[in-house]
Image (tube, helix red, strand yellow):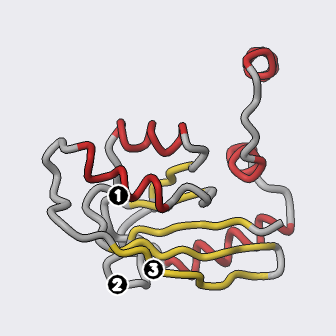
Amino acid sequence: MNVKIAFTTTDRIHVNAHFGWAKEIDVYEISDDGYEFLETLKFEGDLKEDGNEDKITPKLEALNDCTIVYVVAIGGSAAARLIKKGVTPVKAKSEEEKIEEILNKLVTTLKGNPPPWLRKALNKTKSNFAEEVENEAAV
């Protein structure tokens, strides 16, 4: 199973950019065999925090085929819009967290037993309402 994972970054080493302000998002593909760098998505224009939701639309579209995007921070509405597209936003532990370390952990996790949130993100299947209710009841 191959999965695309994205990271908001300013230095291509750490997850250290806010989703809305990120000018660069690095995309990797991971599997239980390892990972490989695919591309850097670049975003231009005025990306500062200003409540302008339109500025995140190109990011949402660019991340459409990603499963997870790691961010240092993300606004509630941007997170909701990502989730609606089937992309799970995950906050990095800190701006010092290295992309390579996260990738290595994910590869190891894929080989073993992924936690429920990751399994759900990896399955990326849109369950119907009845399944949702059933899942809630099982918790």
- Specify few, some or many for label 1: CA neighbours under 10 Å numbering under 14, 14-19, or 20 or more: many
Label ID, residue 11: 2
Identify which residue, 91 or 35, lies in the foreground: 35
Above/below status of 88 relative to 138 = below
Residue at 47% in and 76% down: 26
N-terminal label among 2 and 1: 2
Above/below status of 136 relative to 117 = above
Q: Measure the C-alpha gap from mark 2 to mark 3.
A: 11 Å
Q: Measure the C-alpha gap from mark 3 to mark 1.
A: 14 Å
Counting from the top left corner in percent of width and height, residue 41 is at 42, 74
- Where disc 2 sits, the SS reads loop
Identify which residue, 35 or 108, lies in the foreground: 35
Residue at 34% in and 84% down: 11
- Specify few, some or many for label 2: CA neighbours under 10 Å numbering under 14, 14-19, or 20 or more: few
Label ID, residue 57: none
Above/below status of 15 relative to 121 = below
N-terminal label among 3 and 1: 1
Q: Quadrant of the N terminus?
A: bottom right
Residue at 58% in and 72% down: 102
Residue at 48% in and 78% down: 98
Identify which residue, 115 or 9, lies in the foreground: 9
- Position of 71 with respect to 123 (left or right) is left
Identify the residue position indicated by label 3 in the image: 40
Identify which residue, 107 or 45, lies in the foreground: 45
Question: What amino acid is found at the position of numbered circle 2 in the picture?
Answer: Asp
Identify the residue position indicated by label 1 in the image: 19
